[in-house]
Image: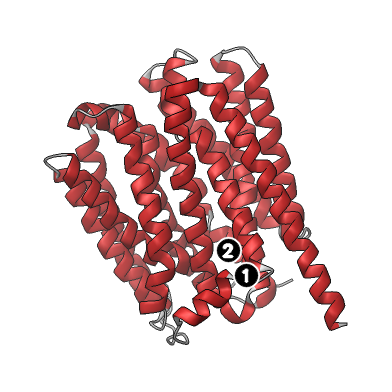
Amino acid sequence: MSALSRTEVPALRSLSLAYFVQATGALSVVGSLAPIASEWQLSDAQAALLITVFGITFAVAAPLLQVMFGHLPRRRQVLVGLAVFSSAAMVFALAPNYRALLAARIAMGLGAALIGPVLGALAAGLVAPRQQGSAIAMVLLGLSMAGLVGMPLAAWMAQAWGARVLFLAVGTAGWLTALLIRFKVPAQAGNPAITLVTLGRVLTDAVLLPAFLVVFFIASAVYTTYAFIAPVIRDEFHGSPHTVSLAMGVLGVAGIVGNLFVVRAARRYSADAMLSAGMALLAIDLLALMSMPSTLGLLFVVLLSWAFATDMVWPSQQRRIVELSEALRGVALAVTSSFVFAGIAFGSAVAGWTYSHYGFRANLIGSLAQLLLAWACLKLSAQRISILSQAKS
């Protein structure tokens, strides 16, 4: 197999940086709950709602924006999305009250809804078909880097300089990334227009619908536990704010290793095999968290495995959708991103309710139950693919 060319690699790295900025801006609230709550005098639940409202906005807007603007060149969609996202992050930094915070997060969700769904399709369109799995994984390396650098840096910055400085930095990084993409990513022709009928067809497709539900339940399972990782470290493991930053760094290091593994493993193993392995490892981690004593050393060991597993899962999900939806790749990836962020929103909401009412182990049980639902949907999707293949032959 030929390697990626010298022009393809810088373009993919630029798109990866866009994922890094989006993921850091979207999820930095997770590690910065305390500084945000302190700055605007909020409860943990109110601060966590900033994760949920972003996820709901993204989930609803991503497919609808593809209907409205999906005919535009994908690079242009990314640039407009970065402009909206970055401007909204700066508005967040200057927000005088909670309502303004919620409005800014909604605007950030709208910008991200133009960025996230397009990056995978844009990356896949830059390379030969046999390189698509590796190209998507390379772009999603930005998500891993957000865990390795962005999340711990965001948590540290919010603790040291305040949440307002953090979101000013996110906005500035977004504008600089837009400039880089403008010069590094080749311009492409527009895409076929997407109609509501096409969107409805994708959402009701017998193979794609259970595939989307796999995405939803995995994301929800992860965030039912992960959304409250900072309060859990504080309350259950008696860690300091610096421990939260360290935990984010641990997650990021393992995530990078997981993503680099996927870049290579995607050439040998199917997306279904990678998803199954990632979900199995997540389930083992949840069972370990249920049974182990509350010591930070053991927590960090589990977090290493947790991050490795999630970074096996995320690119494998997108690769699977790409393989199942050649003719409708753009809208299918937009719907995939919607289901991811719908899962994040649902999981974050569940996390806030279960943790405040029943404690950390209830979050773990909820995550495990949703992983089982994801596995069942994966099996259903694979079964339907097999039936259709037999019918065609």
Q: Residue at the spot x=34%, y=39% of the render?
A: 49
Q: Residues within 10 Å of mark 2 (few under 14, many from 20)?
A: many
Q: Is residue 183 visible?
A: no
The numbered mark, 1 or 2, whose residue comes first in the sequence reads 2
Q: Are marks 1 and 2 in contact (CB under 8 Å)?
A: yes
Q: Which residue is mark 1?
A: 322
Picture coordinates of residue 39, whole percent (x, y):
19, 30
Instruction: Tell me the kind of residue under disc 1.
Output: Val
Q: Residue furthest left?
A: 96
Question: Alpha-carbon distance for marks 1 and 2?
Answer: 10 Å
Q: Residue at the spot x=35%, y=76% of the render?
A: 76
- 270 or 211: nearer the eye? 211
Q: Give SS at disc 1.
A: helix
Q: Residue at the spot x=54%, y=16% of the render?
A: 296
What colour scheme was applied to this rendering of the protein? Answer: secondary structure
Q: Is residue 43 visible?
A: yes
User: From the viewer's perspective, is 373 left or right of 85?
Assistant: right
Q: Is residue 80 above or below residue 188?
A: above
- 117 or 357: nearer the eye? 357
Picture coordinates of residue 193, whole percent (x, y):
44, 86
Q: Which residue is mark 2?
A: 136
